[in-house]
Each structure stands twice: as structure tokens, then as C-alpha cells.
Image (spheres, helix red, strand yellow):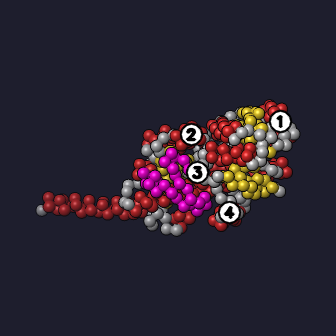
């Protein structure tokens, strides 16, 4: 009798455990990682990008989550530093065991790519521009256009529409600046222009007189600046002090309200790229900007980057939803396969996006110009 009771207990216990596991499976959230700078020199951008992602997660959950289950985001600070990024992503892949993580800043994206590929965890690169990001491996994808898209567009526009034939380039001597500067040089010369100066400056520089005097001596028609958020306004301010009154252009890095605050009248006429719809173009973006003003008392720094980060969360949710509908295990391999299969995503703030087989995306480039101390749309370049 005892043996019979023991035999009964085993399946009863197993059944109970099975019910427990089933209950846990029904309530376990869909988890993903977000690795961005929330401290350090790039926190001005990174902090706003994290806020955009947090709002996206909250909105998705408020609308019912993923088939009734919550979406959960694990946020880790990279300080935009490759080594710190490696530590953060290693934790996401091996401890938190997420199937996908979102990250940005070219040097970090490149540094953590081997971890993503080895662990078979999908890396979604957002707001990183290095053109070779598309070649970092099977598990690395960009969800925003790379430097050769927007920087190529602004270079062509300067030559073909504005009639600028002589350009000087000044760039920060790191992965982001070097890649962007090279992309601009190639596109500008291909369009028929001439690069008359090509000067780098140190990441820790606080004075840019040397390279700027070389730019002044070259007497360009236009100056292309490829810097970062903290240094770009300071470089432009010193340009003006040294008498450089030429048109200054850059990519999305300088498209933020802080530039206007710091430069005042010195910002007039500056052109920057944006690859996401503005509040003028989209009611959803207008409402999003109003949300920033209402809850934070200001507009976001790097509006387009925050839009792409926000919408990367929606891409993640869409893939999770599709996997759940098919009862497929939530693994990095399955996430990658399903994302490729879905391919096209209609996103709230950036519109239709297609993740192409070469790991890139393409979007029209919007050129923004400072007029009367505010950013206004100047042109759209395909």
C-alpha cells in the first residue's frame, strides 16, 4: 500500500509542478535589454533615449502587453564606453539571458557585436552611424539609417542644390567622427565638390584653434562638422570667434534644442539631418513632443534618435507577439528568424521601416535648418 501511495504521489507532484510551471509561463514577462549611456559625457542623449524607450514599454503594456503578458526592459549604463558596454551586454546575454537588446553609439555597437554573435542574441543598433555596422555579423542589425545615408544626402544637397563646391571637414577623432567624416568626404567629392581641408581634433580637446585656423586658411564654401553632443556647440562657437562665417552642417548629432540655447544667434543658418518625421509632418510625433514638454518641461535632445529608440521597442514587441502567436520558444535564434520573416514594421513615430537582407534600412533624409532660433524643415532628400 505504501509503495502504491508513493507511486501516486509522484505523478500528483509532477502534475502540480507542471501546473506551477504553466502558471509561471503565463505570467513571465517578455524581457529585452537596453544598453545606453545614462551617465558620462553622452548622458544628455542617452538619458532621453532611455526615457523614450520607457514610455514605449509603458504604452505597450497599457494596451495589453504581448498577448496579455507584460513587456519588461532591463536598462544598463554603457557611458558610451566600449569596455563598459562589453560588461553590460555580457550580463544581458549570460545572466539576464535576453533574446534581444537595443544599443547605440558606434564604438559600443562594434565592441559588443562579438558577444551578440557568439551568444546568438540579436543586437538592434539605433542611433549609431558607422557604415560598417551592417557587416558586424548575423545577429547585428540597425533599425535606423547609417552614416552613408544621411551624410551622403547632405553632401549631395550642398553641391547639387546649394552650389557649394569647396568643403572643409572637422571631426572628432573617434569611431563616430572618423566614419562620418570619411562618408561625407566620399559623397561630397563624388557629387563634384572638392575637400579643401580635412582636420581631426582630440576627444578631450577644450580648444580647437589649431584645426580651425587651418579651415579658415582653406577658405571653404561650407564646413561639415562631425562631433558629439558636448563638443559640437563649443566648436561652432569658436569658429564664429575666429571669423568663420560659412555655412555649418552636420548630421543628427547637432539637431537638438541645447545647440540653440548655447549658440544663440551663432546657430542661425546651421543645417542638420533628421531621418524621422517631425512634429509638422506627423500628428503622432506632435503628440510625442507635447508629451516631453508636458512631463519634462522641454523638447528631447536628439529628437530623431529618441524616435528610433522608441520605435525599436515596438519592433521588439512585434517580434515577441509573432513568436507567442506561433508558440515558439523565445530565443535569440528564433527572434532573429522571425524578425527577418516579418521584415516590415509600421511604427508609431518613424513610419514604415523595412529591415533589409543586408542588415540596413533606408529612409528619406530630412534637412533641418536653424531659422530665428528654432529648427525648421528645409528639404527632404531621398
> Tags 1 and 4 in contact by the CB under 8 Å rule?
no
Circle 2 residue:
132
Horizontal and vertical percent position of residue 19: 32, 63
Alpha carbons under labels 3 and 1: distance apart: 34 Å
Q: Earlier in the sequence, mark 3 or mark 1?
A: 1
Query: Does the CB distance between marks 2 and 1 fall below 8 Å?
Result: no
- Left or right of 357 on screen, residue 198: right
Q: Quadrant of residue 172?
A: top right
Residue contact at pointers 3 and 4, CB within 8 angstroms: no
Please provide the residue range marked out in magenta.
337-362
N-terminal of the pair, mark 2 or mark 4, is 2
Distance CA(mark 3)–CA(mark 4): 18 Å
Residue 261 in the image: state x and y as whole percent.
79, 52
Q: Residue at 64% across / 56% down in the picture?
A: 276
Q: Position of residue 219 (x, y in %)?
A: 83, 36
* Circle 1 residue: 219
Residue 233 shows in this picture: no
The residue located at (65%, 64%) in the rendering is: 282
Residue position marked by numbered label 4 in the rendering: 281
* Quadrant placement of the N terminus: bottom left
In the figure, 191 relative to 318: above or below? above
Q: CA distance from mark 1 to mark 4?
A: 37 Å
Locate residue 371: give its quadrant. Answer: bottom right
Residue 180 in the magenta stretch? The answer is no
Crowd band around label 3 with a 10 angstrom C-alpha radius: few (<14), some (14–19), many (20+) = some
Question: Which label belongs to residue 77?
Answer: none
Q: Earlier in the sequence, mark 1 or mark 4?
A: 1
For numbered disc 2, what is the local secondary structure?
helix
For disc 3, the marked residue is 362
Amino acid at each position: 500500500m505504501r509503495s502504491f501511495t508513493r507511486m501516486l504521489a509522484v505523478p500528483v507532484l509532477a502534475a502540480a509542478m507542471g501546473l506551477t510551471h504553466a502558471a509561471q509561463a503565463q505570467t513571465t514577462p517578455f524581457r529585452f535589454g537596453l544598453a545606453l549611456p545614462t551617465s558620462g559625457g553622452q548622458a544628455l542623449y542617452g538619458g532621453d533615449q532611455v526615457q523614450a524607450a520607457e514610455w514605449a514599454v509603458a504604452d505597450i503594456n497599457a494596451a495589453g502587453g504581448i498577448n496579455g503578458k507584460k513587456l519588461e526592459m532591463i536598462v544598463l549604463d554603457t557611458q558610451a564606453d566600449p569596455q563598459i558596454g562589453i560588461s553590460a551586454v555580457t550580463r544581458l546575454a549570460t545572466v539576464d539571458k535576453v533574446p534581444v537588446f537595443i544599443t547605440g553609439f558606434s564604438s559600443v555597437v562594434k565592441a559588443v557585436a562579438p558577444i551578440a554573435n557568439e551568444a546568438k542574441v540579436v543586437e538592434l543598433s539605433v542611433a549609431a552611424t558607422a557604415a560598417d555596422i551592417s557587416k558586424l555579423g548575423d545577429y547585428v542589425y540597425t533599425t535606423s539609417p547609417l552614416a552613408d545615408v544621411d551624410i551622403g544626402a547632405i553632401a549631395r544637397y550642398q553641391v547639387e542644390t546649394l552650389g557649394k563646391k569647396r568643403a572643409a571637414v572637422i571631426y572628432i577623432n573617434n569611431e563616430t567622427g572618423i566614419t562620418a567624416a570619411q562618408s561625407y568626404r566620399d559623397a561630397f567629392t563624388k557629387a563634384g565638390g572638392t575637400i579643401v581641408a580635412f582636420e581631426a581634433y582630440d576627444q578631450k580637446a577644450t580648444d580647437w584653434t589649431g584645426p580651425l585656423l587651418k579651415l579658415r586658411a582653406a577658405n571653404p564654401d561650407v564646413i561639415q562638422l562631425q562631433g558629439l553632443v558636448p563638443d559640437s556647440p563649443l566648436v561652432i562657437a569658436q569658429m564664429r570667434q575666429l571669423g568663420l562665417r560659412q555655412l555649418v552642417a552636420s548630421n543628427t548629432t547637432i539637431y537638438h534644442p541645447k545647440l540653440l540655447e548655447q549658440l544663440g544667434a551663432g546657430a542661425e543658418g546651421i543645417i542638420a539631418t533628421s531621418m524621422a518625421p517631425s512634429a509638422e509632418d506627423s500628428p503622432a510625433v506632435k503628440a510625442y513632443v507635447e508629451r516631453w514638454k508636458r512631463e519634462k518641461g522641454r523638447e528631447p535632445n536628439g529628437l530623431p534618435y529618441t524616435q528610433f529608440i522608441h520605435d525599436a521597442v515596438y519592433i521588439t514587441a512585434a517580434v515577441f507577439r509573432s513568436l507567442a502567436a506561433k508558440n515558439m520558444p523565445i530565443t535569440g535564434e528564433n527572434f532573429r528568424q522571425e524578425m527577418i520573416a516579418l521584415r516590415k514594421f509600421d511604427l508609431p513615430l518613424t513610419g514604415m521601416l523595412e529591415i533589409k537582407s543586408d542588415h540596413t534600412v533606408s529612409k528619406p533624409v530630412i534637412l533641418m535648418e536653424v531659422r530665428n532660433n528654432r529648427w525648421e524643415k528645409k528639404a527632404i532628400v531621398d
